[in-house]
Amino acid sequence: MELRYSEEVRRAKEQGVPLVALETSVVAQGLPYPDNLGAARACEEAVRRAGAVPAPIAVVDGQVFIGLEESQMRRLAEGRERLFKLASRDLPVAIAQGATGGTTVSATCELAAAAGIRVFSTGGIGGVHRGVAEHMDISQDLWALARFPVAVVCAGAKSVLDLPKTLEALETAAVPVIGVGTRELPSFYSRSSGLPLEHQVDDAAAAARILQARFDTLGQGGVLFTVPPPEETSLPRAEVELHIAQAMAEADRQGIRGKAVTPFLLSEMARRTSGKTLRANIALLTNNARFAGQLAVAYAQGSRG
Ligand code: PSU
Ligand code: MN
């Protein structure tokens, strides 16, 4: 596949500066304008400050871009045209039909791997949805994590999911789940979930050693790093649970299904908490991008030395 690179990413590749992939479904579908544009810029800046170069990934007019120029990011943020939510399975159709859209975690993992990028930062991954026995809604993100050799940095799975089942599905898919400075799975808006993790690292250097083992020694797929969201903007679990129950009931009433569920629930949550979840979301995105930048730098150093 012919990949297109932004000017900044092309230069980074030439000079061997480590790259961090960023997803853009969070821009095109996950956050409202103009917060989405602000969040994207803050993430890019956080990656740069850590010494790496940000590579937001998207499909623009049927072309895969690794790194976006400002005008392209603005197009995804403003949403004046039809913007697709592109998961892995949507990519061939979007490319063939000249579509434009933001890439979810699954599509971003796939395209990052195609571009040789080993570290990717997002907010929260998709997973097993609540009520799975009825609708079988399980995100492609889990499939992509198993398949592509990319480290995904997140604040856990989105709290609207069934977190215990999501962890079980990750185990079945043989995806290592590592807490960063914690032995408990964070739950996106909250620092806790009540779910213990088996593995913990305390810094980027220790995380990078796991990537060396997984990618370079074993030649396997992804690794999930879960970073607790920043204390100041995180929300208590009980408060989040209350709003999730109401948001899910509303989704049901309105007959929202399939890929529309996640964007709907995120915006419903923001409305119901008068923006508190929105602020938490932006803060954790930036926080994850910072750790991902450090991880990319540490992994590159380890590979050289
Ligand atoms: N995390 C966020 N905001 C988002 C998403 C994750 O903070 O908008 C997006 C990601 O792109 C993720 C997708 O891959 O939601 C999952 O959607 P689904 O549940 O339909 O697989
Ligand atoms: Mn789904």
Image (cartoon, helix red, strand yellow):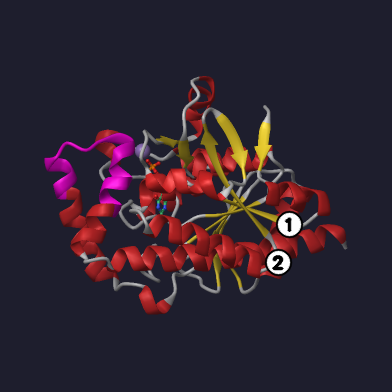
Q: Earlier in the sequence, mark 1 or mark 2?
A: 1
Q: Secondary structure at mark 1?
A: loop
Q: Secondary structure at mark 2?
A: loop
Q: Which amino acid does the dot numbered 2 rest on?
A: Gly
Residue at image x 36%, y 73%? 234
Residue 159 highlighted magenta (yes or no): no
Q: Residues within 10 Å of mark 1 (few under 14, many from 20)?
A: many
Q: Residue furthest front?
A: 71
Residue at image x 66%, y 45%? 6
In the image, residue 167 lies at what x, y percent? 44, 53
Range covered by the magenta-colored residues? 249-266
Q: Is residue 7 above or below residue 63?
A: below
Residue 272 located left or right of residue 61:
left
Real-space Cα separation, disc 1 to disc 2, in angstroms: 8 Å
Residue 49 located left or right of residue 224:
right
Q: Which numbered marker is on residue 51?
A: 2
Indicate the quadrant where residue 66 lies. Answer: top right
Q: Residues within 10 Å of mark 2 (few under 14, many from 20)?
A: some
Q: Nearer the viewer, residue 260 or 16?
A: 16
In the image, residue 218 lies at what x, y percent? 75, 46
| Residue occupied by mark 1 | 18
Q: Nearer the viewer, residue 106 or 63?
A: 63
Q: Quadrant of the C terminus?
A: bottom right
Q: Main secondary structure of the magenta part?
A: helix
Q: Confirm whether residue 34 shows in the render.
A: yes
Q: Is residue 173 above or below residue 225?
A: above
Q: Is residue 112 above or below residue 3?
A: below
Residue at image x 21%, y 59%? 271
The mark total stands at 2
Residue at image x 69%, y 40%? 115
